[in-house]
Amino acid sequence: MLQQLKTYIDRLNEKKFLMYSSIVLGSLVLLIAFMMTYFFWARANRRNELEEINIERSTQVKRILLKAQQLQKQRQEVDAMLQKDPDFKIGGYVDNVLNNLGLSNKKTMESAPTTTELSTKYAESAIEITLNDINMSQLINLIVEIESEKRVYIKKLEIGCSKMSARALEVNITIATLLLR
């Protein structure tokens, strides 16, 4: 095979040999130039992608740090609120709210307060009550009164039609609060 190539090259005159050599050399130079251009383009493209990723990552880190600061502030506010009244009783609070709104006679069921441990620092105390024959206005007033106290929150609210009156509601509501352990 090599011998055949050597004989072919030997038979070429000098002008054709220079022309073929120029074509091969030019093709190699073009191929190398193309490869170098592609390499530098790909490198620049990767650099831009990495810069975009780093910008996005730093934005996410800032967002996470801001959220962590907000959570820490909220945690301190909750701790201060809970330490202000460590003997808070959810049952007494619910009875007081129902009395103030004139809904004590509408209460048909009240569970005993249950305590659930949420973490090493907090526990949740919850009470479930059922109110019958209340109207929408009374329910809204109850919800507003409960939500106005930062110490308590509505964990679950089920509203249905009353079995006693077509225009009244039957409400099953779970009210909860956090406790320091």
Image (cartoon, rainbow, N blue to C red):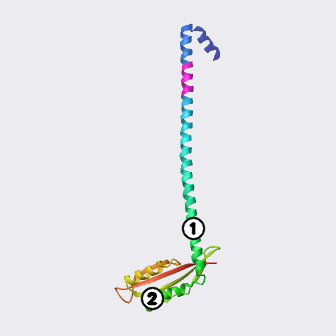
Mark earlier in primary sequence (2, 1)? 1
x and y, in percent, of residue 1 in the image? 63, 17
Neighbour tally class for label 1: few under 14, some 14-19, many 20 plus, Cα within 10 Å: few
Number of residue marks: 2
- Tell me the SS state at disc 2: helix
Give left or right: position of 174 versus 5. left
Q: Is residue 104 magenta?
A: no
x and y, in percent, of residue 4 in the image? 62, 14
Marks 2/1: CA distance?
33 Å
Q: Amino acid at mark 1?
A: Lys
Indicate the quadrant containing the C terminus: top left, top right, bottom left or bottom right: bottom right
Position of residue 85 relative to residue 74, above or below, is below
Overall secondary structure of the magenta stretch? helix
- Which segment did they paint magenta? 25-33
Q: Nearer the viewer, residue 107 or 17?
A: 107
Position of residue 17 relative to residue 109, above or below, is above
Residue at screen point 54% across, 15% down: 20
Position of residue 120 relative to residue 102, above or below, is above
Rendered image: mark on residue 13: none
x and y, in percent, of residue 168 in the image? 37, 86
Q: Nearer the viewer, residue 166 or 90?
A: 90
Q: Nearer the viewer, residue 151 or 54?
A: 151
Q: Quadrant of residue 38?
A: top right
- The residue wearing badge 1 is 73
Residue at screen point 54% across, 30% down: 37
Residue at screen point 59% across, 71% down: 76
Q: Nearer the viewer, mark 2 or mark 1?
A: 1
Q: Amino acid at mark 2?
A: Asn
- The residue wearing badge 2 is 100
Q: Residue furthest left?
A: 167
Q: Is residue 26 magenta?
A: yes
Q: Nearer the viewer, residue 17 or 152?
A: 152
